[in-house]
Image (cartoon, helix red, strand yellow):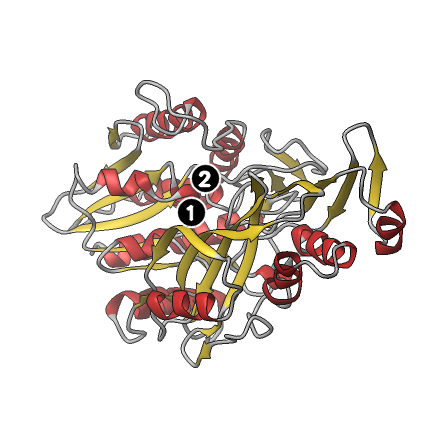
């Protein structure tokens, strides 16, 4: 495809992204006909209406997910991304649900993950259509609405529509991701807290490193111990209110953040220096993100090191509850990971709930991987190889799918962080590569 067909659409693409970013698509309780809340349903309908105005056929799958269709054929080439986003925390320099352009960057929750890339794919498809391209296969751009919370959107879609035979997801990194670590989200009851610890709260999602943690201690605690711990606190009628802060990031790379819950547990372990539960969490679970201090620092050549993230912390009836996110190497099983956790933990720790996503491995010599890699290397004038990540994309729910962008090597996008953004030049660059990918895969 000649690049000019996309160039004339670039301003429209930016305007459409700003509109999509202005719709808050953090998952909320379901409403009638809106399984993930009004914002997600409104955003999906906006995108489908936009695609329809471009001349495409569209399908709204009961507001769980929708697709844009182009071409005919028995085989389906898919592009699978999402419109839902993770919650925001305080401290943004721009409003998170506006879409603010500053110095060639568009700021907003979802700018990179995953609204920006999916809007780029929509305009890539429009450019192909305008160029006169006629695919030999049916093309589906699939817009999910629950990727960040469990992928119930695609589970439902699978009951209604056939899945693509070959696909990519613009929801990871360039050059191309052919390996994704396994994901084991464990909801733990760690054990009984000291009676003087009335409450501990941190985090909103298990797949985000929490940047704020609060604890409430009884007034019977020796205040000097709190002072000696170095934590910021406030004395009220309710008790001693303790606060720690950090830096949020995606739990696929927890070492890039600064976990506020870790800081709180280390403080509490100083104040209650003989308490088994607090000392275990502070010294083992919060020892390092690669689980070495916990006793199972696993790794393999294909996908690297295991990581863990204390994502959500709460208390219930005096017990400590932790939602833990473990990303494990592809050559290990989830059963073995569970065995490692139990074997290396205190006896009071139990797993109350678990959510497991099996690892993904697609042969680097496959047609899909080689096609996408060749497009990237040709456009970027590089000789890059496929990569492995700790993140989880829609790729693992399809029979043949890998992640292709949007993050360029060594460039920060603040995914799952404050001030998330997408560079407009990168948006244009990826849109052209997505057009080439769709064109090549559907010939």
Of 7 and 22, the residue lying toward us: 22
**Secondary structure type for disc 2:** loop
Give x and y (percent) for residue 422: 57, 46
Give x and y (percent) for residue 279: 66, 62
Residue 57 placement: quadrant: top left
Residue farthest along the top direction in this orientation: 32
Left or right: 264 in relation to 443 = right
Give x and y (percent) for residue 333: 33, 69
Instruction: Please give the name of the residue rendered at 13% of the width and 43% of the height, measured from the top-left corner.
Output: 72
Within 10 Å of disc 1 (Cα), the crowding (few <14, some 14-19, many 20+) is: few
Of 348 and 436, the residue lying toward us: 348
Instruction: Please give the name of the residue rendered at 69% of the width and 55% of the height, measured from the top-left corner.
Output: 265
Left or right: 198 in relation to 413 = right
Q: Which residue is mark 2?
A: 8
Question: Which image quadrant: the C terminus?
Answer: bottom left
Left or right: 250 in relation to 199 = left
Mark 2–mark 1 distance (CA, rounded to whole Å): 6 Å
Residue farthest along the left direction in this orientation: 74
Of 85 and 55, the residue lying toward us: 85
Within 10 Å of disc 2 (Cα), the crowding (few <14, some 14-19, many 20+) is: few
Of 314 and 44, the residue lying toward us: 314
Instruction: Please give the name of the residue rendered at 61% of the width and 67% of the height, measured from the top-left corner.
Output: 284
Q: Which residue is mark 1?
A: 4
Label pair 2/1, CB-CB below 8 angstroms:
yes
Placement of 275 over or under 42, stated as above or below: below
Give x and y (percent) for residue 395: 32, 56
**Secondary structure type for disc 1:** helix
Residue 95 visible in rendering:
yes
């Amino acid at each position: 495809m000649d690049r000019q067909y996309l160039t004339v659409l670039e301003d429209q693409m930016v305007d459409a992204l700003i509109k999509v970013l202005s719709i808050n698509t953090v998952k909320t309780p379901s409403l009638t006909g809106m399984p993930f809340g009004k914002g997600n349903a409104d955003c999906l309908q906006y995108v489908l209406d936009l695609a329809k105005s471009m001349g495409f056929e569209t399908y709204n799958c009961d507001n769980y997910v929708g697709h844009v269709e182009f071409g005919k054929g028995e085989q389906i080439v898919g592009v699978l991304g999402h419109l839902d986003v993770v919650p925001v925390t305080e401290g943004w320099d721009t409003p998170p649900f506006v879409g603010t352009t500053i110095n060639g960057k568009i700021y907003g929750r979802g700018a990179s993950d995953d609204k920006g890339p999916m809007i780029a794919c929509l305009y890539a498809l429009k450019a192909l259509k305008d160029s006169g391209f006629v695919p030999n296969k049916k093309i589906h751009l699939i817009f999910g609405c629950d990727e960040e919370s469990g992928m119930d959107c695609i589970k439902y879609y699978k009951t209604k529509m056939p899945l693509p035979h070959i696909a990519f997801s613009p929801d990871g990194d360039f050059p191309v991701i052919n390996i994704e670590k396994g994901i084991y989200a464990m909801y733990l009851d760690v054990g009984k807290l000291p009676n003087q610890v009335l409450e501990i709260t941190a985090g909103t999602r298990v797949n985000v490193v929490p940047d704020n943690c609060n604890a409430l201690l009884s007034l019977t605690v020796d205040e000097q111990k709190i002072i000696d711990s170095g934590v910021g606190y406030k004395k009220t009628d309710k008790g001693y209110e303790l606060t720690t802060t950090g830096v949020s990031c995606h739990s696929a790379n927890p070492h890039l953040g600064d976990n506020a819950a870790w800081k709180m547990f280390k403080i509490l372990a100083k104040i209650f220096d003989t308490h088994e539960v607090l000392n275990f969490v502070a010294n083992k679970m919060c020892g390092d993100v690669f689980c070495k201090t916990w006793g199972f620092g696993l790794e393999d050549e294909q996908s690297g090191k295991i990581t863990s993230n204390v994502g959500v912390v709460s208390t219930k009836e005096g017990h400590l509850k932790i939602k833990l996110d473990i990303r494990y190497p592809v050559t290990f099983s989830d059963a073995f990971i569970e065995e490692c956790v139990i074997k290396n933990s205190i006896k009071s720790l139990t797993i109350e709930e678990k959510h497991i996503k099996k690892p993904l491995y697609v042969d680097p010599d496959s047609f899909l991987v080689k096609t996408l890699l060749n497009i990237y290397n040709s456009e970027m004038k590089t000789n890059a190889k496929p990569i492995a990540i700790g993140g989880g994309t829609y790729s693992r729910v399809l029979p043949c799918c890998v992640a292709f962008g949007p993050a360029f090597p060594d460039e920060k996008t603040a995914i799952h962080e404050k001030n998330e953004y997408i560079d407009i030049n990168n948006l244009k660059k990826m849109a052209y590569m997505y057009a080439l990918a769709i064109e090549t895969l559907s010939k």
